[in-house]
Amino acid sequence: MPESSNEKLSVVVVGAGFAGLYLLYRLRKMGLSARAFEAGDDVGGTWYWNRYPGARCDIESIDYSYSFDTELEQDWEWTEKYATQPEILRYAQHVAEKHDLKRDITFNTRVMKAVWNEETSLWTVTTENGEVTTCQYFIMATGCLSQPKNIDIEGADHFGGEIYKTHSWPHDGVDFSGKRVGIIGTGSSGIQSIPLIAEQAAHTTVFQRTANYSIPAGNGPISKEKLAIKQRYQDYREEARWTPVGVPGKETVDFTFMVSDEDREKRYEALWNTGAIPHIGSEFADILSNKEANDTLAEFARKKIRSVIDDPEVAEILSPTSFPICTKRACLDSGYFETFNKPNVSLVDIRKNPITEITETGIATADQNFEFDAIVFATGFDAMTGALLAVDIQGRNGQTLKEKWADGPVNYLGLTVSGFPNFFMITGPGSPSVLSNMIVSIEQHVDWITDCISYMQKENLAVIDATLTAESGWVKYSTDFSDLTLFPMANSWYMGANVPGKPRVCLPFVGGVGAYRRACNDVAAQDYLGFKFDGPGGPRCN
Ligand code: NA7
């Protein structure tokens, strides 16, 4: 029997990525007993798993870091404008060590099930090793892009060569020298890894289903101006918390067609040269809500692609036209498009020439058979809900989260779900998470949840549950917001459209980090409006 079987805790946390680590830190400060279960053998979450060549953050290092430890933010020195995966992983490990967080983490352990018990007002959490833990609060800190999408291509297990998946890359790396490599997927993971794989491999063949927008990162050492931010870091962080995406920048006050074509072009050019993803969709106030406005930026991006590709036919295939720019997460690249000028790199447009199956020796398309030594899948994730639904979570009256979310992930504030008491999600659907600087969102969610638990302790309340009215109000508000934008026009993972059978709803809250924070703060300030409480100090419902 495992050592911690039948342990009773105040809080069980699932995941020891950036969210789980900060949550453990806060819970310990509150004097609560807490344990995190983590599937990997170390901390870091996304940055533990995604070790493919070229893996980097697309938010600048100065922004993508914790703000809660003012000593850490001064002491830690990032080496590049956009940090690499190994550097971010080292940062997460450093934080865990500095705050001695690992003693509250059980590694190599996947949580399988969590069941709410109405009699005891406790959750019973079971791991894959059969450990059973009871706790008052059950918190999923499992990340938005952590559950890989199933490989939905016939014959994937027939291939006799090497198979690699970007989301679970071998820890000791891969040497592609002299090999013929096929890569499926041209999202961020494909776009970051393809140039480096192509540098090594004898021949690289990229299978593209949907062309993607990507901006040159212009990576390099952090500039002096950026480093100077450290002198006013806490003010800068506070500014970030109230911006649309959690990264300070100029506020957009004008609309696309208020300026001349020439001025617009100049502004796009300047924007392009900064390599700043957070601001790309907000150069003008209507880029994400007016298709004609969006088209001007999309055409600018296509022009940039055409300008660096030698073969006009290849340029055409690589030029995105099927969705408005920024309605799928734009990518940040270092030499991605230029890679297709190399004589040993080929591009296959699988919209025109679909993959029929993976064979023992390679990939068969409608009109050609390709032979490979290795195939790389960069095919993405069951975003935002996949990791939550991978655990069998059962709330009141035996209702499962899967049943509750059959038509889409209803929630209140992206933090809670009605009928699932004392259950919280960090960066859940209904929150801005994937549309923001993730660390800013994580810190806000953790702060809100731990403040809520403190409130309950002070008021002698034991159980919190969102009302159905509050939940449907938040879902409506969130949906209304996304309906005002162009996001629903894309078959993106934001819309759940990349996973066959997944309900088509806009998963993140698109109203921005600042507006979202204001809503969360308002709820808390009104004694947690929209929640029912029970316990010695209750019942009460605000
Ligand atoms: P993404 O962005 O979901 O990209 C996955 C890619 O794989 C995308 O080009 C897909 O084409 C392609 N794909 C998925 N399934 C298939 C099949 N069956 N056949 C061919 N092509 C397929 O995932 P990433 O890991 O690159 O990035 C995820 C996020 O991580 C990213 O947005 C950043 O925020 C960090 P599709 O577009 O669906 O036609």
Image (cartoon, helix red, strand yellow):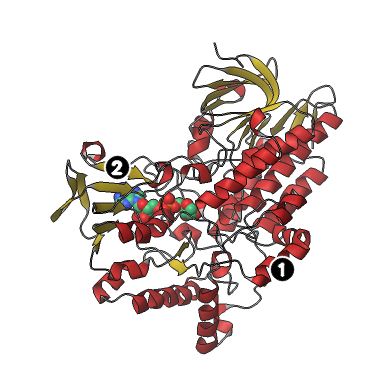
Q: Nearer the viewer, residue 274 or 399?
A: 274
Q: Nearer the viewer, residue 238 or 420?
A: 238
Residue 89: x %, y % from top left = 55, 46
- Based on the displayed image, in which of its 4 quarters is residue 34 positioned? top right
- Based on the displayed image, in which of its 4 quarters is residue 323 positioned? bottom left
To which residue does mark 2 refer?
163
Q: Quadrant of the C terminus?
A: top right
Q: CA distance from mark 1 to mark 2?
A: 44 Å
| Residue at image location 47% in from the left, 57% down from the top | 488
| Residue at image location 72% in from the left, 66% down from the top | 229
Q: Nearer the viewer, mark 1 or mark 2?
A: 1
| Residue at image location 51% in from the left, 42% down from the top | 48
Q: Is residue 114 visible?
A: yes
- Mark 1 burial class by Cα count in 10 Å: few <14, some 14-19, many 20+: few
To which residue does mark 1 refer?
228
Residue 500: x %, y % from top left = 36, 43
Q: Nearer the viewer, residue 63 or 495?
A: 63
Q: Amino acid at mark 2?
A: Ile
Q: Is 504 drawn above or below residue 350 in the view shown?
A: above
